[in-house]
Image (tube, grey):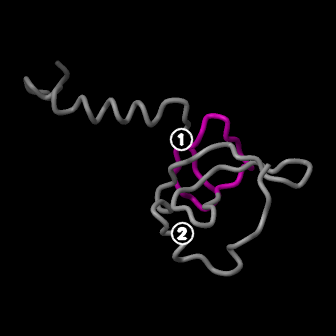
């Protein structure tokens, strides 16, 4: 038993710790250029784009390819732009059209 824990705490804590471990597996913590905290796929590197795709609520990490297309790296958790917050506050200059391959 850890410091400050009481008997029976593990049964209460275990489902939450297991869920956190599962969600963080093969992910890395990152910050965006605008200062958002993020949990991204391990393959994400500086220079990759954070994008909420039209019709979606969660952000994805995209990589610019040399042929002009974008490549999907994976889904991300970015604190402050989940659940469509960034979509509702987007300005016209924030939007762009691109192709994913």
In the picture shown, does residue 8 fall above or below 72?
above
Rendered residue at 60%/39% (across/down):
41
Location of mark 1 (residue) = 29
- At horizontal 67% and vertical 41% (from top left) the residue drawn is 44
Tell me the SS state at disc 1: strand
- Most distant residue in the bottom direction: 92
Which image quadrant is residue 87 in? bottom right
Residue 39 is labelled as none
From the image, state whether disc 1 or disc 2 is nearer to you. Answer: 2
Towards the viewer: 18 or 38: 18
Q: Position of residue 15 (x, y in %)?
A: 26, 32
**Residue 2 image position (x, y, % from top left):** 20, 21
Question: In what quadrant of the picture does the N terminus appear?
Answer: top left
90 vs 21, left or right, is: right
Q: Nearer the viewer, residue 45 or 76?
A: 76
Q: Residue at x 61, y 52 (%)?
A: 60
Disc 1 packing (10 Å; few <14; some 14–19; many ≥20)? few
- Please indicate whether residue 76 sits to the left or right of residue 71 in the image: left
Q: Give coordinates of residue 97: x percent, y percent.
A: 77, 68
Q: Position of residue 7 (x, y in %)?
A: 7, 23
Label 2: state its secondary structure.
helix
Front residue of 35 and 101:
101
Left or right: residue 31 compared with residue 16:
right
Mark seen at residue 86: 2
Q: Residue at x 84, y 53 (%)?
A: 69
Which tag, 1 or 2, sits closer to the chain's start?
A: 1
Q: Quadrant of residue 6?
A: top left
Q: Which residue is situated farthest in the top direction here?
A: 1
Which span of residues is magenta-colored?
30-50
């Amino acid at each position: 038993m850890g410091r400050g824990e009481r008997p029976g705490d593990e049964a209460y804590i275990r489902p939450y710790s297991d869920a956190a471990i599962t969600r963080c597996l093969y992910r890395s913590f990152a910050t965006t250029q605008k200062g958002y905290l993020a949990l991204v796929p391990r393959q994400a590197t500086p220079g990759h784009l954070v994008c909420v795709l039209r019709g979606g609520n969660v952000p994805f990490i995209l990589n610019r390819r040399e042929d002009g297309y974008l490549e999907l790296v994976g889904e991300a958790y970015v604190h402050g732009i989940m659940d469509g917050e960034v979509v509702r506050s987007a300005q016209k200059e924030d939007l762009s059209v691109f192709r994913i391959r």
